Amino acid sequence: MDTQAVIRPEVEVLVIGAGQAGLGTAYWLRRKGVGDVLVVEAGEVAQSWRERWASLELFTPRRFSSLPGRRFPPGPTRSPSRSEMADYLVSYAAGLERPVRTRAPVQRLLRRPDGFVASTPSGDIRARHVVVATGPSAVRACPPRPATWARPCTSCTRRSTARPTTCRPAPCWWWVAATRRRSWPSSCRTGTR
């Protein structure tokens, strides 16, 4: 993984996001003979996995959690943990033989007649094609608490509940982007399983 390389000003394909979708796309582009591919990530590779709650375990067994070209390594449980998934993605990115530029958030993407221009803090990247693989929860969005709630409540997000000690028992307002921006009241509980 090339985290410090200078961002090249022009590429054939720019992949925005270094999660499973972005890394898998870069793999298949290489297999199909597309030689000039750059993957950019706003944070670090697998950062979103490391920010999830500590006890997270995937629902899918290891044998179905692999990305193309590399088997998921064996482990002590049937399904991988969040840390195992994050470590796997970092290892996968390092073996891609394609540059992965971290800490390079794309702040704006413009369509041009000859392709696209992606603006990052390190400069602009021109690309003939762009794949946006940022995932469903790249931007935190917390709605205001409903006016009908008389009791004070805590806003719970993926980051604020990474460890059980960070979420005290209290009424919570959960915001779930993956459910078409629906929200619902809940009650935070801590404990072990």
Image (tube, rainbow, N blue to C red):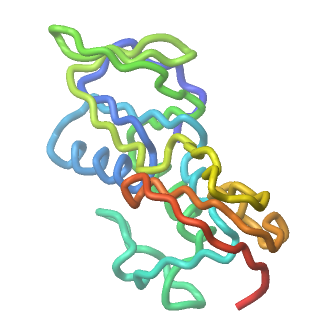
Quadrant in which residue 155 is drawn: bottom right
Quadrant in which residue 182 is drawn: bottom left
Q: Residue at x 71, y 64 (%)?
A: 162
Q: Residue at x 50, y 18 (%)?
A: 120
Quadrant in which residue 166 is drawn: bottom right
Q: Residue at x 60, y 50 (%)?
A: 47
Vertical side of 37 occupied by 168: above or below:
below
Q: Nearer the viewer, residue 113 or 68?
A: 113
Q: Residue at x 45, y 57 (%)?
A: 92
Vertical side of 71 occupied by 98: above or below:
above
Residue 70 in sight:
yes
x and y percentages locating residue 76 in the rendered image: 60, 90
**Label total for image:** 0
x and y percentages locating residue 158 in the rendered image: 62, 58
x and y percentages locating residue 60 in the rendered image: 40, 81
x and y percentages locating residue 12 in the rendered image: 24, 24
Q: Nearer the viewer, residue 107 or 82?
A: 107
Q: Residue furthest top?
A: 113
Q: Nearer the viewer, residue 41 or 181?
A: 181
Q: Is residue 193 left or right of residue 95?
A: right
Vertical side of 91 occupied by 128: above or below:
above
Q: Check the picture and name the quadrant holding the C terminus.
A: bottom right
Vertical side of 187 occupied by 95: above or below:
above
Residue 51 in sight:
no
Q: Nearer the viewer, residue 33 or 59?
A: 59
